[in-house]
Image: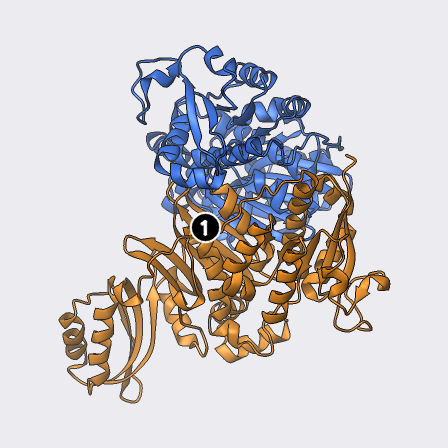
Chain colours: A blue, B orange
Amino acid sequence: MGKRTVKVGLLGLGTVGSGVVKILQMNGEQVTRRAGAKIEVKRILVRDMERPRAVEVNPQLLTTNPDDLLHDPDIDVIVETIGGVDRAHKYIEEALHHKKFVITANKDLMATAGDDLLLLAQKQGLNIYYEASVGGGIPLIRPLKHSLGGNRITRILGIINGTTNYILTRMSLENMDFNTALAEAQAKGFAEQDPASDLEGKDAAYKLCILSRLAFNSRVRFKDIYIQGIEGLSKRDVFYAGELGYAIKLLAIGEELQGGLVLRVHPTLIPLTHPLASVLNENNALFVVGDAVGEVMFYGPGAGSLPTGSSIVADLIDVARNINRQVENSIIENNFQEKRIVSMDELSSAFYLRLQARDKPGVFASLATAFGGEQVSLDMIIQKRSVQGMAEIVLVTHKVEEKNFNSALRSIQRSPAINKINSVFRVIEK
Amino acid sequence: MGKRTVKVGLLGLGTVGSGVVKILQMNGEQVTRRAGAKIEVKRILVRDMERPRAVEVNPQLLTTNPDDLLHDPDIDVIVETIGGVDRAHKYIEEALHHKKFVITANKDLMATAGDDLLLLAQKQGLNIYYEASVGGGIPLIRPLKHSLGGNRITRILGIINGTTNYILTRMSLENMDFNTALAEAQAKGFAEQDPASDLEGKDAAYKLCILSRLAFNSRVRFKDIYIQGIEGLSKRDVFYAGELGYAIKLLAIGEELQGGLVLRVHPTLIPLTHPLASVLNENNALFVVGDAVGEVMFYGPGAGSLPTGSSIVADLIDVARNINRQVENSIIENNFQEKRIVSMDELSSAFYLRLQARDKPGVFASLATAFGGEQVSLDMIIQKRSVQGMAEIVLVTHKVEEKNFNSALRSIQRSPAINKINSVFRVIEK
């Protein structure tokens, strides 16, 4: 086609960076055909020149000096795979100032500084591509921006953290307890040695930030998101959920209601018949509801070297096409509106509740009083035979205002008949 | 943005056409923002000016003369929603000759004449967009062309016919027989009054043509596809499949093997744990395996006015962006390679087989001889107590060369111990 080669500066040659290089090596001819031009990695920033690499590269491409990439006028596009916030932020700003397109896999950065960076990119007549920042290899950003562009999206519902989904799957299918499942996830590389950000729901919340901006065309900040993690989740809850016809999943949920946006990450009981319930192990999925399309779901591997690399290479193909046509033709999302954030207290939810009661007369009466006083009605109850004077009771409520449920909960806690409230989770029917 | 309004000529105002108009009315402001320009339906071709419409339109837009759209230099893009092959073909060719972009929802046409039309479009510096032709509202074409552009795709596996999936779901969940489920599907509008094309698997084969071209970058013709439909499928098979841990789905399958492409549509037993098994009712899903991304799946409504309209509006947004940048920046697929088509005889499959045997000694011996002679080994067997001297036997084989299985089948048919072979289906484990 006579188009000029597009030159890439790659920041980082770890899991994701080496995936990108490997795909360009494996499928270079096809990538060239799709991009309408050759894509060449010209320089790679690494921390340690001597470290063994998962992929074969010409050692002369490696450098430890970021200026060798960021200041090279020959480089058209910077691919950032180093992760973290501060250094990546600085490099991306510098790349944009030097008139380079940017592709990043960095969810933390796009969640916290994405608005400003996208604005800067637009000022420079450029764009930032970040398909790889959410959902690994699953196409999510491009479908939200392009394929569903005619829809007013009312809801997104996703399993967007592979670590927690792996743990919850193992607990459910193998009847494992939390710590055993976590240890297995770590051994298999599905959980970090310090898994706090995943288990606490922060990782999912970063990704929800990015997705909600696009879905609801709104400014969304990390602090706008209500977060509850899955640390120490009991296998008894996984068991009871199954018995009641539910799976427990860590869901990231964004909704646009009349009053504004509700944004939350929490363990959730969803019916076993829901498409998200059969998303197992380290896989991710995003369920999207639009006013025209109805319900669609995107499913696949949420992380990994080649899957994440696949998303970056898709972005590279887009950038190459734009460079050679001398246009920036992808949709730039930068005029996000401010929308009100609805607090959890204003929400109505159904709840799952497991508690330990003293096995004596009047227990159900005191529960009934506490719930009845706050208009909380019950949908399902399980009580098994009591052991050593203690009965375990599992309840699922109908939908109820959260503030009412919370005050019912407080009065239950005060009741002498109730020994302990073990767990409280939200239930979503569809 | 000061971009000029993009003018649309709409062919047809039936289910799909009125969906497009409705979405532009509902979400016009957002569409304008995403497209960077206003999108205006200037003229609509209808057959009958007086017919009541599902959507409110200015009657002055309606015309029965196609030249009012195709010859109007003011119209930038023709959206074809009339269906059928001959008339649609003629109009689309004419639109391209008159330098108009084309968007179509027409699977039959794109399957049978897509290669030529795409080539003509390219010669004219234009493009044809056809996201709506497969999978209704589910983004499939754009992900295959763009999001997975870095992958060599080895396999696509899809439920891409809503009618048959609805029937199979009802048979499975409600224990209905085929005719009752079909009648219900017709009553609910999920099956046509003449459902032959759906039931025989032709509709799915047209769509497989379109998807396989993109996935395997290959010329694919309708006649290359092996087709087996679901007409008269027995509820006994649905029941036994469930007992063995499988769902029966009408799958469209494209694979690139060493020897070439295998393209087929047939009822298939898939494990209940497979993501496609939980695709219920009229929904569609496409499962894609790529060498970089691994396994991804796209799920949603495979038909309907607004879902299909959603895909067309996404295409309109792309066209509008391209028109205003005076480039054609979407990937044009026209240099498809010729690839060898692998015949079913060369394939290895596992099979499900239900047969009726006379309940007397030697039945299993004759089966064993027939199978053993052709290297067919058995994975699972069900035999229930016999009724009136007849025993129903259900077998699942291990993977075996199809030609061997077929000759075993012929010798079983000749065996005096076997009364009838009721059904033969392929089984896919993953």
Residue A210: image location, x then y, percent: 60, 32
Residue B426: image location, x then y, percent: 34, 66
Residue occupying image coordinates x 85% and y 64%: B59
Mark 1 = which residue?
B335
Residue occupying image coordinates x 38% and y 60%: B270
Residue B207: image location, x then y, percent: 50, 62
- Local crowd size for mark 1, using a 10 Å CA cut-off: few (<14), some (14–19), many (≥20): few
Relative to residue B71, is residue A350 depicted above or below? above
Residue B239 shows up from this direction = yes
Farthest residue, direction bottom? B388
Residue B58: image location, x then y, percent: 85, 60
Residue A360 shows up from this direction = no
- Quadrant location of residue A168? top left
Q: Is residue B164 left or right of residue A173?
A: right
Relative to residue A274, is residue A164 depicted above or below? above
Residue occupying image coordinates x 82% and y 73%: B50
Chain to which mark 1 belongs: B
- Quadrant location of residue B277? bottom left
Which residue is nearer to you in this view: A181 or A6?
A: A6
Tell me the amino acid under the disc marked 1: Asn
Relative to residue A52, is residue B409 depicted above or below? below
Q: Is residue A178 left or right of residue B312?
A: left
Relative to residue B244, is residue A215 depicted above or below? above
